[in-house]
Amino acid sequence: MRYLTSGESHGPQLTTIIEGLPAGMPLVDSDINEELARRQKGYGRGRRMQIEKDTVQITAGIRHGYTLGSPVALVVENNDWKHWTKIMGQDPLNPEDEAEVKRKISRPRPGHADLNGALKYGHRDMRNVLERSSARETTVRVAAGAAAKKLLSQLGIEVAAHVIEIGGVVSGQRDYSSLKELKEITEESPVRCLDQAAAQKMMHAIDTAKENGDSIGGIVEVIVEGMPPGVGSYVHYDRKLDSKLAGAMVSINAFKGVEFGIGFEAARKPGSEVHDEIAWEPDKGYYRKTNRLGGLEGGMSTGMPIVIRGVMKPIPTLYKPLQSVDIETKEPFSASIERSDSCAVPAAAVVAENVIAWELASAIVDQFYSDRFETLKASVEQQRQFAREF
């Protein structure tokens, strides 16, 4: 499985084309729209979320609610495009419009892709960089992830995410009876946090940051249940499942770190308190008595829940701008403001959930026969049965 995304933040639309979904898998627009709506929620979001009401158009690869096996094309229109038709239009400019539209952005913002992208592609107008490097692109990454989540759910694999820290406020509640309960509680929380007391403190921290013209980051956790054991590989570095999941997590805008299970805490513990002892029971086969390694050993799934966390830095666009240098004049200046989120961690949890779902679905499709969905489903169940009886 693979996908490409295309589109700019203020362009006419965002597009993704997905290749590799098995034929005969149920998929309708509501499966995707639910995830798109979740991405737009969250305490601390800016005015853009009031402008864009993201819904998907499925333009290829689906017939009567089922995948065809051919590439699936998904489109999300940008409602704000109507205000940007001259600035972001594809046609050459008329002379009378050139002075108005050709106001170059020559002042790179610290923490963004502006300067590095300009140095890479030679853009003197850095709008050519920031329009694509914007986190707006995660809209269609979530759309692709929604298709992956549908595939996983049909295979008995569930994915959920929640926020465990924002601006130094840490959730004290990490226990849940089921992923269903986790989803129900966090969907009702403005910051997607299990701990209601911590959630109130998180929202206060977001408000304080906004009042100070600042921004704050946090940590999100993704949990996956139902993965069959042995998905991934120990044979080659580029097929290790934990490597792919880690790459997916840090590919999200503003994510700068990742850990599995107890994560970096393992560096401070002896091996006897890190590794998970193996047990066996007739009804479920092999399992681990603990899950400190987060459901992954040797680059493969163990059958235990996969637990992965990602750290998101504060959004770099601030109302008390940092210093930078104009690439034309080489003079110092205070960075400009392009967006107004003071915290996007709750929304980023939804993005993380979907990019992780994509990598898991992709690994399954790579490992098992997947031209036809019913055959894929049977193959995955056969692997589960084999592992129980081994």
Image (cartoon, rainbow, N blue to C red):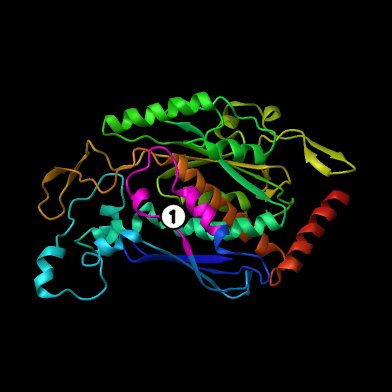
387 or 206, which is in the foreground?
Answer: 206
202 or 294, which is in the foreground?
Answer: 202
Residue 80 lies in quadrant:
bottom left
317 to the left or right of 175: left
Q: Is residue 89 above or below residue 323?
A: below
Give the residue drawn at x 36%, y 61%.
78
Q: Position of residue 335 (x, y in %)?
A: 20, 44
170 to the left or right of 361: left
Give the residue drawn at x 16%, y 53%.
327
Q: Position of residue 138 (x, y in %)?
A: 44, 55
* 227 within the magenta span: no
- Residue 328 appearing in the image: yes
Which residue in the protein does label 1 denote?
138
* 33 within the magenta span: yes
Marker count (numbered): 1
Q: Amino acid at mark 1?
A: Thr
Q: Is residue 263 above or below residue 250?
A: above
Q: Is residue 335 above or below residue 215?
A: below
Locate the N terminus by quadrant: bottom right
Give the residue drawn at x 27%, y 39%.
318
Give the residue drawn at x 33%, y 36%.
215
Q: Secondary structure at mark 1?
A: helix
Classify mark 1: residues with Cα within 10 Å, few (<14), some (14-19) or many (20+): many
238 to the left or right of 335: right
Q: Which residues are magenta?
A: 32-56
Q: Position of residue 307 (x, y in %)?
A: 62, 41
Q: Position of residue 266 (x, y in %)?
A: 60, 31
332 or 221, which is in the foreground?
Answer: 221
